[in-house]
Image (cartoon, rainbow, N blue to C red):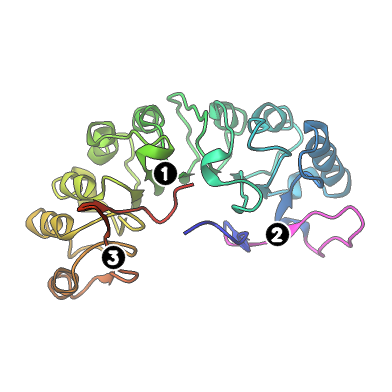
């Protein structure tokens, strides 16, 4: 599976692509503004000009949510973090940022170039939502951020050092954490040890929604989650899009109780019908999603299993 369509909503707001010629919405703060380079392969200045044009027409404090698409040659040039940091004095109302919201036709997720995104959290202390797509060159330093309530890294392969940094961050308001762990072939080298601080939850006191998804090591993640302290206070546990087998289901059911969850998402998996029915039955009060069962891909007696999102 690839990402083939753009998001239509972000942080609960409808996404509107900024057009210099179009009439503005009656309430420009009631939409998430999408900004992108107008020409494929354009120079970085084009995105800067688009953002400047947006801020020349829309009151800066009315830009509450921003979706940044292709910044021009995203497969070659890293994300415009410095540009967005430089605009912080003007984007005084920004509360939600999606960086790299591109389809596979614009740039495959594992080709999207990044750099250290810590500056975004430092420059926007009022930011509540940060979502980043792509992980090639992605860096994060441990940071304290008092307002962030949602953090997501979408990737075909997430570097372990990014997960380490997330675990070392102090995010007292964070309720939603989403980590697309991915595959080794696309740079995903996260281990269960890297996840330990997140699963302990000591620095994430408000966490209620945890997604450790799109994981090639889904069974190992399930085994670690089964005894993780953070799980007892979760409402949503998302282990979807990965390569989970019956072993992962067995680990979840043999571990701590999961009946307090509102939702357990396991869709896109390699679990047998019998094991899938067993977890649905044993967690009767939980909305358990075991849809989108995958079949093993065998070649010369070698079994291949794939995450939902890779290249």
Mark 3 nearby-residue class (10 Å; few <14, some 14–19, many ≥20) = few
Residue nearer the viewer, 14 or 306: 306
In three-dimensional space, the C-alpha distance between marks 2 and 1, rounded to whole angstroms, equals 23 Å
Res. 129 visible in picture: no
Tell me the crowding category of disc 1: few under 14, some 14 to 19, or many 20 or more residues within 10 angstroms, Cα based: many
Indicate which disc, 2 or 1, sits on the residue closer to the N terminus.
2
Nearest-to-viewer mark from 1 and 3: 3
Horizontal side, residue 279 vs residue 184: left or right: left
- Residue 31 marker: 2
Which image quadrant is residue 3 in? bottom right
- Going from N to C along the chain, the mark reached first, 1 or 3, is 1
Q: Quadrant of residue 238?
A: bottom left
Residue at 32% across, 35% down? 190
Magenta residues?
A: 12-27
Q: Residue at x 63, y 59 (%)?
A: 6
- 208 relative to 232 in the view: left or right: right
Q: Is residue 259 above or below residue 243?
A: below
Which residue has dot 3 on it? 295
Q: Main secondary structure of the magenta part?
A: loop
Considering every residue shown, the one lying at the far front of the view is 300
Residue 44 visible to an observer of this rendering: yes
């Amino acid at each position: 599976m690839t990402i083939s369509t753009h998001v239509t909503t972000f942080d609960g707001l409808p996404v509107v692509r900024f057009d210099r010629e179009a009439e503005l919405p009656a309430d420009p703060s009631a939409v998430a503004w999408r900004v992108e380079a107008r020409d494929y392969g354009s120079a970085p200045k084009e995105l800067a000009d688009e953002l400047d044009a947006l801020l020349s027409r829309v009151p800066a404090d009315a830009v509450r949510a921003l979706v940044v698409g292709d910044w021009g040659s995203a497969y070659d040039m890293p994300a415009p973090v410095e540009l967005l940091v430089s605009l912080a004095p003007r984007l005084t109302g920004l509360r939600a940022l999606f960086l790299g919201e591109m389809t596979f036709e614009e740039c495959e997720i594992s080709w999207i170039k990044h750099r250290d995104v810590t500056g975004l959290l430092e420059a926007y202390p009022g930011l509540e939502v940060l979502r980043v797509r792509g992980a090639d060159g992605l860096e994060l330093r441990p940071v304290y951020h008092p307002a962030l309530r949602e953090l997501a890294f979408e990737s075909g392969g997430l570097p372990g050092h990014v997960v380490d940094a997330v675990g070392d961050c102090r995010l007292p308001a964070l309720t939603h954490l989403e980590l697309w762990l991915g595959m080794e072939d696309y740079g995903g080298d996260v281990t269960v040890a890297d996840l330990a601080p997140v699963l302990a939850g000591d620095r994430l006191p408000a966490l209620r929604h945890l997604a450790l998804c799109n994981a090639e090591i889904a069974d190992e993640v399930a085994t670690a989650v089964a005894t993780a302290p953070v799980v007892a206070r979760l409402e949503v546990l998302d282990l979807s899009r990965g390569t989970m087998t019956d072993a992962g289901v067995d680990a979840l059911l043999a571990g701590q109780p999961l009946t307090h969850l509102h939702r357990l998402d396991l869709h896109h998996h390699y679990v047998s019908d019998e094991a899938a029915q067993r977890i649905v039955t044993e967690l009767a009060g939980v909305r358990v999603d075991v849809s989108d069962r995958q079949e093993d891909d065998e070649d010369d007696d070698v079994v291949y299993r794939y995450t939902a999102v890779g290249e």
